[in-house]
Image: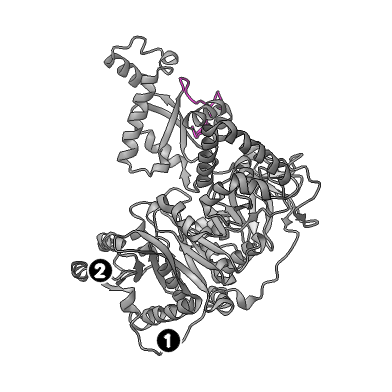
């Protein structure tokens, strides 16, 4: 089941003549542009476009529940109903909470209809939406509330207690609005005692029939501030204007060829711009959004009920689907496996000619697989981290649909590159989306230059109307990545392919993404693990095609000697011999797990396997700098066999 390599002579992006500059390669752009009228570049106008197309059609879907709490069919509100509720919420914000134009309003919940309704209300009045989510760490709520001087926070009822528990650290917070009516008298009393008013969204909507007049935004008004954990230290708030968000959404919709009939299942967190951009694109089309139950354990059940046409996810989930199907086929064996392999190869040959469906084989072999995602998915989009070419090809064949892969950051509102149907499957992330410019900057310290042959290589830089305006209250961090002429330096190392597609080949900084899209700050985690008495040196590594971390550990020889003596093990001073012992490795892993637990590392930040190495990283062996900083590219190259072995052992 190897991936189909491109043998096409077509070129899928174009170079702007004479655009190279010292230290930078030429600018490449999409083959096609997309005219965008300036007056449409606000999220309120985007919603009104969808409203005009699909006023009485279904917009937001939520699973109903019976008396026992069991999930049933989806129930829908139309665009007209959503418009009416958003107007009432906006009036409540204005009249009861006295929210002012461009004031920050927090939203803290899992994906649900009220999230979108609240956002629409904010867009109507030019409020700034500030999403919160707890995976950034326990201090994220007070930090974001204080950083934005937030007065109003809308959250689901299950998170009210969480917000109240940190109210003492949030002096600006005056109002908590629960999306649900299940608020107790005790919670209201507790809120009052802490100097904050707790109301429900339903109460907020109890306003006179005369709604407040809209105060619509301009394209250059701030629409949202998205906090990202891309570095060590406090989260950074990316400032996204209405122009940047709507532009990104329009470009993604154009490249993905989204249509108004589609139903999208919303389960990726809305605080992440990938899901936000898709949801905005769907709304502008007048299409439908169905929300998952809030627990990914039931995602496949939600998909079976919703039967979406669009499925946007991350490689980690697609890898699991791939592994489950392949293992199931292998376990079946016999005639079933023979038929699957024959059908797969037949469709694989058709795929080379652009065909993703086959009437016979889809009916006989792949229909049950396709039913896993509801049976009518037309487009799968993968983002947040690279998707392996093998898995991408498998998804196209097994699910009989287009599978496109995108690349973007919070700072590009998820839009930088995206593949499309004509591009053959391969280890790439597509081409620049329309209206976006990409160039490569030389990184001589890593031996990457835009003059490299046959593939120009360098740091990916992006420019366009989708690019963020900077980090909120952080001009220094902004200047580090955003140039005066609008170029965003991504920190990712890319290489142009002969067919005009681009591939990610490395990461400039010691921060990387895992397959599920989570950022990992290597140095921060290494410093935590270095607190283990066993660890003298550590090199942490995370492959963006994998969902977990591995590490190379040089143990402290004195601690090893002591451990050996305590366990009656001879030759404790012979480190070369000791590192081969499974019981030493287990002891080191146990110690590392203890310090990780004490430091409250997230699950994705915890090392799953280690290679114990006897020799110190030194300047002489070229694994550290003269100031003893790790030389990560050299360490990765030096320990590549051990890294590969660790990941293979974890499968």
Residue found 29% across the figure and 14% down from its top: 565
Instruction: Name the N-terminal-most of marks 2 and 1.
Output: 2
Q: x, y percentage for residue 552?
A: 47, 28
Residue found 67% across the figure and 50% down from its top: 359
Q: x, y percentage for residue 57?
A: 53, 75
Q: x, y percentage for residue 506?
A: 60, 41
Tell me, yes or no, whether the two marked residues, 2 and 1, touch with CB atoms within 8 Å.
Answer: no
Say left or right for 597 vs 239.
Answer: left
Q: Quadrant of the N terminus?
A: top right
**Residue position marked by numbered label 2 in the rendering:** 183
Does residue 42 show up?
A: yes
What secondary structure prevails in the magenta region?
Answer: loop
Question: Which quarter of the figure has residue 336?
Answer: top right
Residue found 36% across the figure and 56% down from its top: 140
Q: For the residues marked 2 and 1, what is the alpha-carbon distance in whole angstroms?
A: 27 Å
**Residue position marked by numbered label 1 in the rendering:** 212
Secondary structure at badge 2 equals loop
Q: Is residue 77 above or below residue 609?
A: below
Question: Which quarter of the figure has residue 251?
Answer: bottom right
Q: Which residue is more in the foreground, 85 or 634?
A: 85
Q: Which residues are magenta?
A: 613-631
Furthest-top residue in this view: 570
Residue 618: in magenta span: yes
Residue 536: in magenta span: no
Does residue 556 show up?
A: no
Q: x, y percentage for residue 347?
A: 69, 44
Q: Is residue 132 above or below residue 24?
A: below
Callout 2 crowding tier (Cα within 10 Å): few <14, some 14–19, many ≥20: some
């Amino acid at each position: 089941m190897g991936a189909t390599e491109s043998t096409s002579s077509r070129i899928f992006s174009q170079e702007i003549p004479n655009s190279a500059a010292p230290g930078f390669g030429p600018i490449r752009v999409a083959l096609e542009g997309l005219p965008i009228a300036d007056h449409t570049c606000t999220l309120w106008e985007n919603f009104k476009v969808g409203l005009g197309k699909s006023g009485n059609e279904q917009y937001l879907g939520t699973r109903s529940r019976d008396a026992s709490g069991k999930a049933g069919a989806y129930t829908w509100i139309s665009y007209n109903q959503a418009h009416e509720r958003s107007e009432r919420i906006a009036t409540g914000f204005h009249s009861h909470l006295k929210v002012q134009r461009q004031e920050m309003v927090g939203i803290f919940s899992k994906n649900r209809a009220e999230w979108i309704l609240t956002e629409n209300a904010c867009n109507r009045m030019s409020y700034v939406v500030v999403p919160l989510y707890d995976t950034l760490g326990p201090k994220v709520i007070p930090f974001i509330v204080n950083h934005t001087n937030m007065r109003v926070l809308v959250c689901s009822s299950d998170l009210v207690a969480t917000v109240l528990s940190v109210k003492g650290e949030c002096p600006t917070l005056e109002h908590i609005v629960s999306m649900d009516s299940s608020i107790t008298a005790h919670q209201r009393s507790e809120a009052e005692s802490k100097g904050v008013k707790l109301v429900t969204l339903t109460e907020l909507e109890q306003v006179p029939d005369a709604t407040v007049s809209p105060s619509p935004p301009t394209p250059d008004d701030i629409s949202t501030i998205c906090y990202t954990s891309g570095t060590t230290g406090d989260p950074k708030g990316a400032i996204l204007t209405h122009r940047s968000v709507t532009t990104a959404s329009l470009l993604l919709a154009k490249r993905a060829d989204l249509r108004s009939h589609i139903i999208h299942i919303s389960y990726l967190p809305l605080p992440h711009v990938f899901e936000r951009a898709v949801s905005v694109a769907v709304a502008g089309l007048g299409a439908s959004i169905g929300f998952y139950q809030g627990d990914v354990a039931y995602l496949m059940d939600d998909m079976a009920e919703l039967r979406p046409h669009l499925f946007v996810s991350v490689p980690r989930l697609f890898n699991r689907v791939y592994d489950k199907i392949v293992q199931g086929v292998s376990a079946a064996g016999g005639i079933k496996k023979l038929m699957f392999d024959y059908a797969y190869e037949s469709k694989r040959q058709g795929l080379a000619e652009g065909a993703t469906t086959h009437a016979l084989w889809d009916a006989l072999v792949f229909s049950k697989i396709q039913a896993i995602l509801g049976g009518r998915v037309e487009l799968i989009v993968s983002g947040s981290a690279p998707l392996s070419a093998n898995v991408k090809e498998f998804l196209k064949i097994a699910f009989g649909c287009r599978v496109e892969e995108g690349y973007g950051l919070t700072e590009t509102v998820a839009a930088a590159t995206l593949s499309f149907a004509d591009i053959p499957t391969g280890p790439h992330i597509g081409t620049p989306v329309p209206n976006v410019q990409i160039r490569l900057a030389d990184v001589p310290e890593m031996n990457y230059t835009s003059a490299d042959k046959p593939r120009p290589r360098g740091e990916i830089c992006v420019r366009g109307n989708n690019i963020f305006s900077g980090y909120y209250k952080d001009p220094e961090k902004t200047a580090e990545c955003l140039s005066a002429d609008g170029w965003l330096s991504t920190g990712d190392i890319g290489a142009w392919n002969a067919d005009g597609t681009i591939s990610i080949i490395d990461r400039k900084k010691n921060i990387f993404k895992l397959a599920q899209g989570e950022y990992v700050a290597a140095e921060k985690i290494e410093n935590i693990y270095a607190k283990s008495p066993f660890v003298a040196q550590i090199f942490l590594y995370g492959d963006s095609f994998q969902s977990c971390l591995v590490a190379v550990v040089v143990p402290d020889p004195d601690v090893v000697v002591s451990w050996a003596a305590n366990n009656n093990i001879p030759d404790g001073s012979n480190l070369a011999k000791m590192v081969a012992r499974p019981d030493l490795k287990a002891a080191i892993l146990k110690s590392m797990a203890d310090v990780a637990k004490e430091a409250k590392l997230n699950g994705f930040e915890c090392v799953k396997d280690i290679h114990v190495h006897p020799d110190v990283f030194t300047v002489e062996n070229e694994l550290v700098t003269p100031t003893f900083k790790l030389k990560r590219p050299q360490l990765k190259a030096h320990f590549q066999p051990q890294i590969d072995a660790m990941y293979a052992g974890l499968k």
